[in-house]
Amino acid sequence: MPPLAALFILTLLLSGAEEPTAPPTVPMTGVVRERVSGKPIPNARIEADGQTAQTDERGEFLFYLPPGERQLRASADGFSPALLQATVSAGRVQRIEIRLDRSTELEPVRVALPRRNAPPRSAGSAFTLRKEAMLREVGAAWDIQRVMAAMPGAAQTSDMTNNIAVRGGNPSENLIRVDHIELPTASHLSWQGETGGSIGLVNLDFVRHADFYTGAFPAQFGGKLSSALDIAFREGNRRRLAGEMELSIGGFGGGLEGPLPSGNGSWAASARRSFLSLIREPLRLAAVPEYEDAHAKIVLDAGASQRIALTALGGRSNVDVKWVRNTDRVLFRGSMTAAGATWTGALADNAAFRATLSHTRRGGETRAWQPIDALAYENNAAERETALEAIVETGDALHGGAWQAGLTARRDQFRHQILSEAWRGFSENEGRIVWLDARAHNAAERAWKVGAFLHRDQPLGRHAVLRAGARASRFSLTGAGGIAPRASLQFSLPDSARLSLSAARHRQDPTAIELTLHERNRSLQSAMADHFIFSLERPWSAGRLLVEAYEKRYRRLPVLLEGEGVYASGEMASRGERRASGVDLLLERRGRARGSVQLSLSRVWARDSAAAPWHRGDFDYRRAFTAEGGAPLRGAWRISGKWRFVGGRPFTQFSVRALPDGTYEPLPDPLKRNLSRYPNYSRLDARIDRRFEARGWGASLFLEVQNILNRENVFARHFSWKRGVFEDVLQFKRLALIGLIADF
């Protein structure tokens, strides 16, 4: 019997049996700190489940609560209160961190307050999700990037990867950070230039919360054109040694955590390994990926208002792909490691600093055979970056204004050894077929990326806040750089409604692989994208309505010369343009029974130069609709579901010519670019969750069925060089998944 089937049967037996008696209450710990300085707040009041606790001189508090979902309210003299949702477990001792904003003792100022479930310094197009909400996301399989693909304005490019296209941008335009460490990717089996891959590398159980910006993100974040994903890892257990075990589509593994021997901090570590070879057939895998990853975090309290956090994560993976009818083959091996140390502390009652030193490394080996017995492409690559970031914050965003300023310096190194015949392949990042001619490169480069930013939050009277900033940057290898300003004006309206207008410029330097393709690519400039966003939000006690209209104008995008002719030389020029515009609507209801409806209407146009005709953008989906919801059932069961509809992505229908050896070859035609569309994408998913609690342990389990209707969604069309036809490559059909996290 397959292990997953055995686990499912065991789960059904356990659910029908009498549950172990759960303890009446279990401990939950946490700390309350000032929003800006991070200083602990003594004598703060925490209310939960009809109980009240008070923080000690270190800002620490302790509750004994029944297991389950609990809402906490924190308040303190001189601070605005805050609400927080948390899961109390009979196993792991939950530790949470609550940040409070300073308030005034004078008459309350009716300024545009930060949006609920949104990070600070953002006026719109930003969402904050805690781990509990991400674990409940239907169809995401505990993959943080697949979770973010469900946000308004974002779209997952295919079932087979967690690559995200945000408001017309391609997957290389997304910034990903973990504990202030910028990652080249957060996924296994990720190709050069992409931020996504087949399987998420970040263990969701290690995450505390994540901020996701889909446009006009603050000046603190730079170097990307479309979005920013800022992930914060949680701290380990500070009361006792604890552990967890996990089984999901991401693999199986476990972890341990506990307090430091000195008692002034904590540590946590985990490791996972894949088991996809057991479910190759139902996943329709052309190959069996193998991967493993590990995470670790140590937090040390260096006094009442200073902390040092050490974070490390990494993984490696490999896959041997044989495409449709075994006509092509690709072998890929890759690895990614990242480590960083962050020192935070208070400078005054309302001022703080943060300094982060980090190092990342990404390596990969790629080989492609076309046909299957002829080696056509070989690439051995290694990319490293050492970075230092220092930030100072001061003031109060709602009362008198606040400043944030920072400096960054990054030392980049990359080595690419490329040996290739004239080669044709499908680019997931660009969403289309690309041609490259024969080449032999052995490039090794070092370069500096330096930047500085300044941000100001300024109240304007009683009903508005101006948020403005700018980021300056320079890339030594190309000499490219410039200033990217950002500004937003946010108004508070009656009934807690909020209206905001935002404009921002973002810059992105050429990637290492783009610089390697041709010696003249050193002349590439920084690509630019100007964002213009109108946002209107109407919250209420049980939910909210959010409407956002946007326009993005891209300039100086790198494009292949020679009109992307057959076997292009690889030389690129910064002359591409793109236009993306649309409207995103979100209507959601929170609570035990929750639900949401999302509608996105958009148009994306692109051209390779000012003289070229406009054509549909590679990620011009036009329309997307999502309806999802969940409700508790009897006992500790919960049921939820999601239906997602996305318009068909455009593609180019190539002409085909016969070759003298009896094979065939597709011919590109720039005048026919993206005139055809794939069929519309539609998927219905359903899920049932169960929470188990007993003395000394707790567990969260889900059974999910994706694509219940077994719809044959088309991902791409693969060209058969033997038959001279394009054959549909289908996305996942009906698929059953099980996920389990047990903590003790």
Image (cartoon, rainbow, N blue to C red):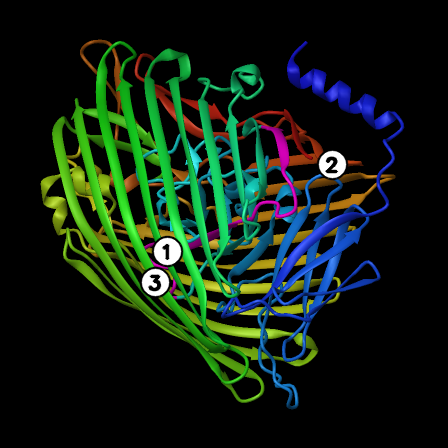
358 within the magenta span: no
Task: Please tell me whether mark 1 sits on a helix, a strand or a loop.
Answer: strand
Q: Quadrant of the N terminus?
A: top right
Task: Please tell me whether mark 2 sits on a helix, a strand or a loop.
Answer: strand
Residue at the limit of the structure toward the front, as seen here:
262
Residue topped by disc 3: 390
> Quadrant location of residue 62?
bottom right
Measured from the top left, where is residue 502 in percent x and y?
A: 45, 71
Instruction: Residue at 12% x, 31% y: name it.
Output: 442
Q: How busy is the neighbourhood of tag 2: few (under 14 within 10 Å), some, or many (20 plus)?
A: many
Judged left or right of residue 709, residue 189 is: left
Q: Where residue 126 is drawn, which disc sits there?
A: none
Of the numbered discs 2 and 3, the one sitting upstream in the chain is 3
Q: Quadrant of the C terminus?
A: top right
Residue at the limit of the structure toward the left, as seen here:
520
Measured from the top left, where is residue 501 in percent x and y?
A: 48, 73
Task: Please tell me whether mark 3 sits on a helix, a strand or a loop.
Answer: strand
Judged left or right of residue 43, residue 231 is: left
Q: Amino acid at mark 3?
A: Ala
Measured from the top left, where is residue 519 in percent x and y?
A: 10, 41
Gap in Å between the C-alphas at discs 2 and 3?
40 Å
Judged left or right of residue 130, residue 303 is: left
Residue topped by disc 2: 698
The residue stretch that appears in magenta: 219-248
Residue topped by disc 1: 356
Gap in Å between the C-alphas at discs 3 and 1?
7 Å
Of the numbered discs 3 and 1, the one sitting upstream in the chain is 1
> Marks 1 and 3: in contact by CB < 8 Å?
yes
